Amino acid sequence: MNRMIKKAILPAGGLGTRFLPATKASPKEMLPIVDKPMIQYAVEEAQACGIEDFIIITGKHKRAIEDHFDSAFKLEESLKKSGKKKLLEEINRLNQLNFAYIRQREALGLGHAILCAKPFVKDEPFAVLLSDDIIDTDAHLLRDMINLYKEFESPVLALQKVPISEVNKYGIIDGTKEKDKIYRVNNLIEKPSAAEAPSDLAIIGRYILTPDLFGALEDVRPGKGGEIQLTDALSGLLKKRQIYGYLFTGKRYDAGDKLGYLKATVDLALKNTELSVAFKEYLVKTVEKIKTKQ
Ligand code: G1P
């Protein structure tokens, strides 16, 4: 099998109910964090790992995503004329990438969204990135996962330890530690209760998957929430092949949640070269004010 990961699937068909009313008619994936839409962080993270082909699974009210990754001729001309080179470079940075869009006709879950990409992935391994998980790119999670895939030629799931009170928000694995940060997956359960959870190892939104997953997805019945769950398909696949988990100890933001979104905004603004000094000053003053009121 081809060991190079050239394709990424980005599911973006969800309704974004946690961000209503902002997401009533606009995609959640287009909510900006500092100056980029959420989904662009995931695209750039994959691009940095040599991924060039992006399959975005969309749905109703998601056309802004297609426009965003399209070239913007008039805007480019105007930036050229006004000599705004830096901005021009910034919007041209993704021009060499290929984007394909598939409409998920019904919101039947993450597993179903991925299955929609089957005719376009064919016989290649691929990455899946859930764009509301913002990963600190300095930590190189995806690169490490791709390297593990090359070593084991098996699917690799990103894991993070979560408090037991939060296991019901994630796919949770039962795993055997093989070596530092690497787990052999024995079982997976989608959003278990604290009592059912086999561990505190949660799957976070980065996966390296193999094309035999599609067969497993076709066999899966609706699970948690009546949806076709990726976790259930992985559990089916586990009967046929080994799956590995990679423990991520770097920074991740659940930007699909309002508080996580705010934390990502603050931290990424502090990293932004144009904003960091003034923003830090503002934050320090704000914290001082809050402290004096307490
Ligand atoms: C999805 C998956 C879940 C995984 C999570 C990571 O859930 O179904 O297994 O742990 O992403 O963010 P969602 O957040 O879409 O409900």
Image (spheres, rainbow, N blue to C red):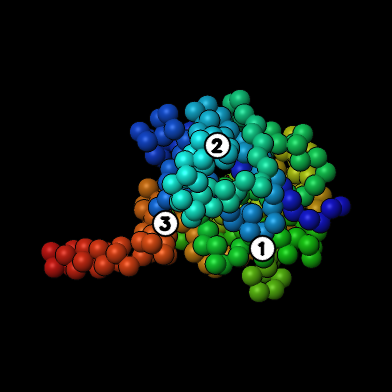
Instruction: Name the outermost residue toward the left.
Output: 293
Residue at the (16%, 65%) spot, across then down? 289
Q: Amino acid at mark 1?
A: Arg
Q: Are marks 2 and 3 in contact (CB under 8 Å)?
A: no
Name the foreground residue: 61 vs 104: 61
Q: Amino acid at mark 2?
A: Phe
Name the foreground residue: 87 vs 123: 87
Position of the C terminus, as image quadrant, is: bottom left
Could you tell which of marks 3 and 1 lies nearer the N-terminus? 1
Q: Amino acid at mark 3?
A: Ala
Instruction: Name the outermost residue toward the bottom.
Output: 180
**What mark, if any, has residue 264 been given in the picture?**
3
Q: CA distance from mark 2 to mark 3?
A: 31 Å
Q: Position of residue 159 (x, y in %)?
A: 59, 60
In the image, taking residue 211 as reference, residue 90 lies left or right, namely: left
In the image, taking residue 126 as reference, residue 41 lies left or right, namely: left
Q: Label 2's element? A: helix
* Residue 192 visible from this viewpoint: no
**What mark, if any, has residue 73 been given in the picture?**
2
Q: Which residue is mark 1?
A: 143
Q: Nearer the viewer, mark 1 or mark 2?
A: 2
Q: Residues within 10 Å of mark 2 (few under 14, many from 20)?
A: few
Could you tell which of marks 2 and 3 lies nearer the N-terminus? 2
Q: Nearer the viewer, mark 2 or mark 3?
A: 2
Q: Position of residue 210 (x, y in %)?
A: 77, 49
Q: Label 1's element? A: helix
The image shows residue 22, relative to residue 250, as above or below, that is above
The image shows residue 217, relative to residue 32, as above or below, that is above
**What mark, if any, has residue 75 been given in the picture?**
none
Q: Label 3's element? A: helix
Q: Position of residue 8 (x, y in %)?
A: 67, 47
Residue at the (71%, 70%) spot, across then down? 178
